[in-house]
Image: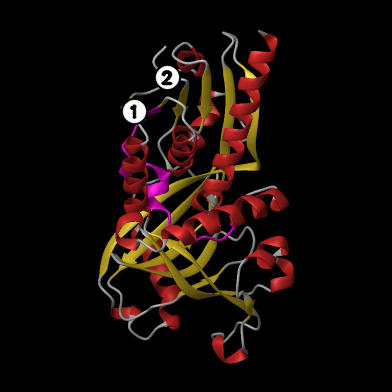
Amino acid sequence: MDSDVIVVGGGVIGLTTAVTLAESGRRVTVWSRDPYTDTTSAVAGGLCWPYRVEPEERAAAWSLRSFHVLSALAGRPGETGVRLVDGTMADTRAEDLGTWADGVPGLRAAHRDELPDGHEAGVRARVPLVDMRTHLAYLERRLASAGAVLERRAVTSLDEAGRAAPVVVNCTGLGARELVPDAEVRPVQGRIVIVENPGVDTWFVATKGSAEETTYLLPHPYGLVLGGTAREDVWDTGPDPAAAEAIVRRCSPFHPGLAKARVLEQRVGLRPFRSSVRIEAERLPGGALCVHNYGHGGGGVTVSWGCAEEAARLVATGDQAARTDR
């Protein structure tokens, strides 16, 4: 075998996991059906904040670890796609955020004059905001520098990967629904609109739990991301002019220039939601160790490094167990 580990999936979860393993000295090959530009990760708005990812306590720990890694990468934004940006999470109180709020430096309650009309509470924080396409390209370069190999190939079964390496890490996101198979993995459709930025330099989010319609403004180098939707069990990724117009209409009151801002693009992705992120190990029928790392919902980049390191620990534990058995 040419590889110690096959990582299946080339989105942000697969690439961060592969980087973590390769930089620890393992020979890693990534199997990804799609280029990173066609993954759900490439569509994401990229705000580092736990959203639709469970269980909450573990997600907070994964998120804080990722927060620190991404914050360090923000020193090279042109290369990594990561910047630290101030913003407001409306309709939220710090005490409702648990250990996540405790670990984010400077996170505080928003003052009344920092909140738009109609919003009585909120928190302010400076957090990583990630240009996902730039970041995914950075991860691929970092992967190559660590000696790993990236192959474009579809995978019909995890056993197929298990015949190519003694360890498989399953980072297939929504694809795990069929590949595992795991019917608990469900799509949550996310639609965003990108417009020319009329001068917004801070992020703003107003969302309530499982609401299908959310409101957010995320300033990126390529434009201002306006969002969004969170529609459960919706598989459609096609254009929807009415939905795009509704997003712009919801966001327009938060900046006077938005109503006339030129629309650049509409993007749609399917978040891989699961009632609980699955990070656990099992043996495949052929004997290979399989570590699952999927079901991250709307928090992929937010938990990416924390989950990658946990998956890597399971790989190491499995390696140790195999040596002991021998």
Q: Is residue 78 left or right of residue 73?
A: left
Of 213 and 97, nearer the camera is: 97
Does residue 126 sit above or below 308 in this rendering? Answer: below
Q: What residue type is disc 2 on?
A: Ser
Q: Which mark is residue 199?
A: none
- According to the picture, the residue beneath numbered tag 1 turns out to be 149
- The residue at 34%/41% (across/down) is 140
Does residue 232 sit above or below 151 in this rendering? Answer: below
| Residue 129: image location, x then y, percent | 44, 63
Does residue 168 sit above or below 23 in this rendering? Answer: above
- According to the picture, the residue beneath numbered tag 2 turns out to be 3
Could you tell me which secondary element the residue under label 2 belongs to? loop
Q: From this viewpoint, is residue 186 visible? A: no
Q: Which residues are magenta?
A: 29-52
- The residue at 50%/54% (across/down) is 69
Q: Quadrant of the N terminus?
A: top left
| Residue 300: image location, x then y, percent | 51, 48
- The residue at 64%/78% (across/down) is 108
Q: What residue type is disc 1 on?
A: Val
Distance between mark 2 and mark 1 Cα atoms: 9 Å
| Residue 215: image location, x then y, percent | 50, 69
* Label 2–label 1 contact, CB within 8 A: yes
| Residue 155: image location, x then y, percent | 42, 21
Q: Quadrant of the C terminus?
A: top right
Does residue 230 sit above or below 106 in this rendering? Answer: above
Could you tell me which secondary element the residue under label 1 belongs to? strand
- The image quarter containing residue 255 is bottom left
- The residue at 60%/71% (across/down) is 105
